[in-house]
Every structure is written in structure tokens, then in C-alpha cells.
Amino acid sequence: MKADIKQDELLLDVRGLKKHFPVQSGALRRVTGTVKAVDGLTFTVRKGETMGLVGESGCGKTTAGRTIMRLMPPTGGEIRFNDQSKGWLNLETLGRKEMMPIRPNMQIIFQDPFSSLNPRMTVERIVGEPLVINKTVPKDEIQDRVAMLLRRVGLRAEYMSRYPHAFSGGQRQRLGIARALALNPQMIICDEPVSALDVSIQAQVLNLLEDLQAERNLAYIFIAHDLSVVEHISDRVAVMYVGKLAEQAATEELYYHPKHPYTEALMAAVPKPNPHRRERPIPLPGEVANPANPPSGCYFHPRCRYCKDICKQETPELREVSPGHTVACHLAEELNLRGVMG
């Protein structure tokens, strides 16, 4: 942990997080390999800030989020959470019963608003279920609390008797947000919360998330593919590649002064609003490395146009190259990479 960050400012401290899945084959289902979905992830989240988590499909973003939530047991590493009532806790050491009182402070908004809501439950039951399970509100007050939550996310209280099929995608995502807010959490993991929505509805949901953050001092881990959305909402951004953290910095620093070749390629793909500033994307040859059989050295080296022998032989360590800017690249100090504006 950095000396310039006070302990009481942090909400989450993830160190060397790993989540590996065994590969089984044959009639006897013997373990013949391991998929390293998350392989040594390290980052922090401060109270009231938004940490963006980006990368290609399959890089481990969603798995990382679910492992931090302890929806999946971690294979290794530490997940330290600053609970508002219990203080700092090592979540990876807690059992199911021990996690129960912690879960209200860590909630998640799922990616697909069409499959994350039970079609056989009314809105009142969907949003009120966390209150019932955790017994935080008397039964005779649950309906009033659900009505308040619906109004807060821009829906009418009369909708409580309806079922999910009666709502549009944007409205369903608002229901997911209301459910996540029900227990007044400290942190919400937003797993691509706007990727399935139209652009106009995306803006509404993003504005809602920002308003709620300012109102409740919420911390977000915002997982997304759309780099423009991440730039808009995030205070800091972490870039993942094949389960590892490639680069992490404040949003403006990362977007305009990337230090990792993979980040440079991502920034070159961001659409430019000015038609007179069209730039060629940076081609990445080959395919994303196989997490079950990653290459030696830097996982990105088979696709990197700056690759040298050291990149093929030695795994780069995540190190700080400037205040608050960490990168896992042997050549970070040598390269002059192009940012989002070229």
C-alpha cells in the first residue's frame, strides 16, 4: 500500500488476487490443466470513487468482480474490505456465515437486465428481497421502502405489482440499481451496467449512478468495454490483459499518456468526435493469449510491436513509473506512446 494513501481513505485493497479454474478431460474427469482467469490482480479502491476496469472480452474483468464479491472463492491473494461497522476484514478467509453480515455493504449490478431479474417475481419482491433476507426493515415497512427506492431511480411506486416483462431494458436496469441500493451499500460492482442499453438510455443510467454516488458517497468498480463510457464516469482506470493488470492510473493520465502498448492500442480504438481528426487504429496481430496456456514472459509480447527479447523471457512486474501511475512493461520508460487524442 502506498504511503501517500491514508488507511482510512481506502475501502478495498486487492493484492495478488487469483482465480483459476481446473480443466478436466477424459472419462475420469482428470485435471489436465488450469485456466488462469485472474492471475495476480492488485489494485485499491478509495471511498466514494469510481475505479474503471477495462480490457478485451475474456480478460477476466467479470470474474475479478465476482471473486471480490466472494460469489466465487478466490484461488489466492488477499481481498481486504473496510467494512463500516467491523473495520478492515480479509474476505478471502471468511466462510459463508461470516460473509453474511458483510454482504449488505458490497452489492452488484449485473450486465444483462433481461436475465438478472426473476420473471416470476413482482417488482416489490425483487427490490424488497434483500430487506427480507437481511431483516433490516420491519415487514410492515418494506413496501414503503421499495416505493422510495423506485422513486429514487426514476420509476413510479405503482410499478411494484408488475413483473419484469412489462419493462424496457433501461427500466429493468433501474430495477437492478434499486435492488443494489436497498441495503445502503458502501460499494457497488457495476458489471457492464449499460452495455445492453441504447445510447440515450445509457446516458440516463450513467447520470443516475453519478447522482447516487454523490448523494451516498458510494464507491464503484465499473466494468465495461466502452472506453468512452469509462472515461466519463471513472476517477481511475485499470487495464486488464489475460487476467493480469497491465496498467493503472488516473483517468486523464491513462487516456492521454499511456505507458503500456496494449493501452495505446485500446486508446487508438476510441471513436473520435471530430471528423477531421481521424487516425488509424493500431493493429494487434494474432489472438488474445490462451489463459490456460499463456506465453512466457509478458503475456502481451506475441502481439506487441515494441517487443524485445526481455519481453519474451521475463515477466514484467507491476511498478510505479510516476505518482499514481503503475504499469507492467519492461519498456515503459523508453516508449513514447500515443494517447486517445494522438
Image (spheres, rainbow, N blue to C red):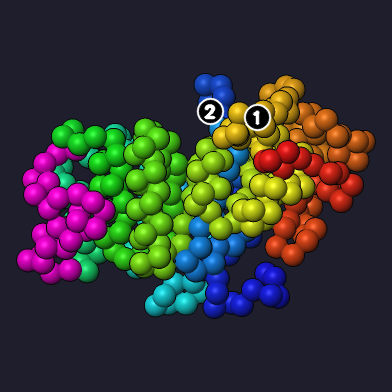
Whether residue 153 appears in this view of the structure is yes
Q: Which mark is residue 29?
A: 2
Local SS, label 1: loop
The span shown in magenta is 137-164
* Mark 1: amino acid: His
Q: Which mark is residue 276?
A: 1
Task: Residue at 57%, 35% (x, y): give it.
Answer: 273
- Residue 225 in the image, given as x and y percentages of width and height: 53, 37
Could you tell me how many numbered marks the image carries?
2
- Left or right relative to 330: residue 250: left
Task: Note whether 9 is above or below 265 in the view shown.
Answer: below
- Residue 184 in the image, given as x and y percentages of width and height: 31, 66
* Mark 2: amino acid: Arg
Q: Nearer the viewer, mark 2 or mark 1?
A: 1
- Left or right relative to 82: residue 320: right
Task: Residue at 70%, 62% (x, y): give it.
Answer: 324
Label located before the other in sequence (2 or 1): 2
Task: Residue at 53%, 28% (x, y): give it.
Answer: 29
Task: Residue at 86%, 44% (x, y): give it.
Answer: 335
Q: CA distance from mark 2 to mark 1?
A: 57 Å
Q: Which mark is residue 24?
A: none
